Amino acid sequence: MADREYGFRTRAIHAGNIPDAVTGARALPIYQTTAFVFDDTSDAAARFALQKYGNIYSRLGNPTVASFEERIASLEGGLGAVATASGLSAQFITFASLAGAGDHIVASANLYGGSITQLDVTLRRFGVETTFVQGSDPADYAAAITDKTKLLFAEIIANPSGEIADLEGLADVAHAHNIPLIIDSTIATPYLNRPIEWGADVVIHSATKFLGGHGTTLGGVVVESGRFHWANEHFPLFDQPVPSYGGLNWHGNFGEYAFLTRLRAEQLRDIGPALSPHSAWLLAQGVETLPFRLQAHVDNTRIVAEWLQNDPRIEFVNWAGLTGHPHHDRALKYLPKGPGAVFSFGVRADGTRSGREIGQKFIESVNLASHLANIGDAKTLVIHPASTTHAQLNEQQLVDAGVLPGLVRISVGIEDPEDIVYDLDQALTRATEGK
């Protein structure tokens, strides 16, 4: 039994969670503490110098958070994971660990608006330039790479355009240039796609979304494959002495754990976006039901997307599970269970009002669905990205990201699908008839 490879549903419940050695508690305890007692001064010094494993301070590590990290790493098939306070903070510490002033990133233009702004505003202010690639052809990413490029970055399912990344093609491009492929897999989760199996080196999640699943808790997590050789000409810091840790060498001392150790012991230490133990506990509860929830999400999404596609009031539906979508075959390859539960659609304009005006009226007319800026909740959610989640983008960036003026984003929940369709239908009726 010790050699058995347990299934996804089993690991979603058990990975990283063993009965508490002291009390015998079977449920994951919440270690609500800021710091941990040392055995003696030698023990404290060894832990601070990274010469001995052990908890120091909950900004760096906490047993409840560690359990959540181990569970996600297991589900993704990764070497390990580092959890953070939000998805954007997970993304930021990853970029900060690999790129500095004068460096360059190649990223998809089809990203969540906050990700685009983090790259285009904050990191650019710190001297890191980003080239945003429109479309998903790996050749276009290859053409954008320079001798300063440190990584390729894309979302497996783009938010909100619904574009599907060519993971194998992007991995080939990245590795041909000896740089890592980093994939945001928030919408897919490891239930629908495990990017490491297709060549990705680092996977990032906003755990706030489907991993938690209930719209209650912020969190992020970074998972690493353990396969990328970080001590190469692009990343000299991984193979140089680290003054703040007594001259140790990330690669020389930690080998395949070099990236994860540096992410925790340097980026999480200095930038500080720690995930709280209570939040980690809540997210771990959500992960226990992840496979059941995601299947229900996808099943409902297919019903909703097909209904919208057949409604004459709808101009377009961007869900790759539909046969007419340009990435339908790619979705079948990378996401055979279904391409997620978040997609966009456009309401058709009439003779007097634009699609944007009718779309906004539609959003104001839903009853069951909620109008808010989140995805991945058990509840159905709708929003108008151009005026909210992507409002900070300029007109060209909106076009590049596939965010048209009348586009509506929907995150399909796990309610009865007939009730979701009923709500969308009545809202469309009110919007198109001007009631």
Image: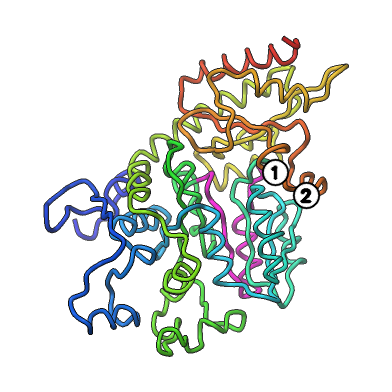
Can you give x and y, in whole percent of width and height, for residue 122 in the image?
Answer: 67, 61
Can you give x and y, in whole percent of width and height, for residue 286 in the image?
Answer: 37, 41
**Residue 169 appears in which quarter of the rendering?**
bottom right
**Is 176 colored magenta in this rendering?**
yes
Task: Report the residue marked by disc 1.
Answer: 390
Residue at point 12%, 58% (across, down):
22
Tell me: residue 323, above or below residue 52.
above
Query: Helix, strand or loop at disc 2?
Result: helix
Q: Upstream in the sequence, badge 1 or badge 2?
A: 1
Q: Are marks 1 and 2 in contact (CB under 8 Å)?
A: yes
Can you give x and y, in whole percent of width and height, for residue 91 in the image?
Answer: 55, 59
Q: Amino acid at mark 2?
A: Gln
Q: Which residues are magenta?
A: 162-188
Q: Identify the image quadrant of the C terminus.
A: top right
> Farthest right residue?
351
> Farthest left residue?
23
Q: Identify the image quadrant of the N terminus.
A: bottom left
Q: How many marks?
A: 2
Tell me: residue 202, above or below residue 155.
below
Q: Amino acid at mark 1?
A: His
Query: Helix, strand or loop at disc 1?
Result: loop
Q: In the rendered view, does 81 fall on the left or right side of 114? A: left
Task: Report the residue marked by disc 2.
Answer: 397
**Is 383 colored magenta in this rendering?**
no
Q: CA distance from mark 1 to mark 2?
A: 9 Å
Tell me: residue 1, above or below residue 47.
above
Can you give x and y, in whole percent of width and height, for residue 351 in the image?
Answer: 88, 16
